Amino acid sequence: MAEKREQWGSRLGFILASLGMAVGTGNIWRFPRVAGTNDGGAFLIAYLVANLIWAVPLLMMEMVMGKTTRFGTVGAFRDFIDRKSTWLGAWVGFTCLAIMFYYAVIMGWALRYFVYAVSGVIKAGVDSEALWNGFIGNPSQTILFHFIAILIGGFIVYRGVQGGLEKANKIMIPSLFICLLIAAIWAIAKPNAILGLDYLFVPKWASLGKADVWLNAFTQSAWSTGAGWALIATYAVYMKENEDIGVNSFMIVLGDASAAILAGMCVLPTVFALSATPDAAMEALKAGNTGLTFIYLAKLFPTMPGGQLVAAIFFLALTLAALSSLLPMIEVGVRNFMDAGFDRKKATIIISIGGFLLGVPSAYSVEFLNNQDMVWGVGLLISGLIYAYAAYKYGIDRTRNEIINKTSDIYVGKWWNYCIGLFPVMFAIIFGWWVWQSYTWYPDTWWNPLETYSPGTMVVQWVVSAVIWIILNNWLASWIKGSSPQLEALNIGAGIKEGK
């Protein structure tokens, strides 16, 4: 198929698109909120550890799968492992799309605040909490901006790789970093802002003994870097044959962490600077308000010279950041439909319509959005286990030596083997620890599937998804057309050897 011959025009294009995938609302909207509710400095340590031992190795494995199979998630797992494992690719792909359903809603929020800034609504004296509550409590507004977000994202993906994705990210990512840097410098200069920096960078060591800090850190790492989403695996389908894997993975994680820390340096000092007392600031952070970034930055910008312009630039950058991450989410679905014989335009229309309709519940209810964020955010860790299983099936050491190091600009040592091999142990410890603490803290509701943040709601939704894809496994294996010629040449993958 002609679509499969699409490639990135340059390495810079791939790296910027990958950074665009990673750097998004996960950094600006999610990181400050999650860091704020999880004791700041302790969370930051756990987050950086998660980046090194989870995100970097996992991104490498995603690139291996996409680059060697030239298929989206469904075809990649069918050919790299075996036909019986096709459903694993469907589970991974759906997990990404489940996040996309509510992610477009968040992009809609950013777009709405850009309109507020341009129209002069964000100004001195505005009640930023009332502004947020008025918008978020108006379903007609939230659904409208959700629709606009999907429409914009779908249009760019409709244009293709070089014509849409690559060109858009060459503009969006540098703009975002410039806006973040300006906002962070201004926030830090305000009175009492140093308390926010202390909160972010000075750890409470006892907090490292809390399971929820580690679970949220690993989830944030996966959510923010894209590790386990299959976004990089899908982008890797369009990599050139000699494209690096090792350095690219480190650059993506480094760039993403830099953006997250910059966002934290912008939002958390602002909360302390604009709160009546340090205790009030702590109360605001611990509340975990979904609108934390929107509420406090809408207070910050009117205090700046040219605040309306800065607010407009910042919320435009936030919109672009959200868009740069929304694009590969749409592409995950589109790539799988293209592998099944659909052309890019039809596939994009199908995924965009589905994304809008299935995102409406999150646009209607913030409580539902919070539930989906928890369920599928932690679900990314399951996806990480699935990619580790793929490495195990082929051979972890063989994967590193025969595929990763074949084109990497740096030598990837055996540390990668240990990280991938220990994925199940890391997940079992962190998730099991959190479930146990949930049971001891909330004995009456810990397993209630109707509770927003309970282990029960996660497991029930994960199992339902898995059962559906297991039932459809054989149909999915046949739905994907053709096989992976590169795998055939390398004699990789039980799926190829079985013949389809």
Image (cartoon, helix red, strand yellow):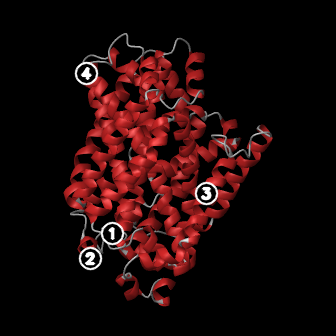
Residue 122 is left or right of residue 435, and the answer is left
Look at mark 1 in the image and give the residue it sits on: 338
- On the image, the x and y values in percent for residue 364 come to 47, 36
Cα separation, mark 1 vs mark 4, equals 41 Å
Is 91 rendered above or below residue 18? below
Is 380 rendered above or below residue 146? below
| Circle 1: residue type | Met
Mark closest to the chain's N terminus, 1 or 4: 4
| Circle 2: residue type | Met
- Kindly identify the residue that appears in the image at 30 percent across and 68 percent down: 238
- Kindly identify the residue that appears in the image at 23 percent across and 74 percent down: 2
Cα separation, mark 1 vs mark 2, equals 9 Å
Look at mark 3 in the image and give the residue it sits on: 462
Is 112 rendered above or below residue 213? above
Q: Quadrant of residue 439?
A: top right
Mark closest to the chain's N terminus, 3 or 1: 1
Look at mark 2 in the image and give the residue it sits on: 1
Cα separation, mark 2 vs mark 3, equals 34 Å
- On the image, the x and y values in percent for residue 144 come to 35, 36
- Kindly identify the residue that appears in the image at 61 percent across and 59 percent down: 464
Residue 153 is left or right of residue 131, and the answer is left
Mark closest to the chain's N terminus, 3 or 4: 4
From the viewer's side, name the closer residue of 456 and 347.
Answer: 347
Look at mark 4 in the image and give the residue it sits on: 119
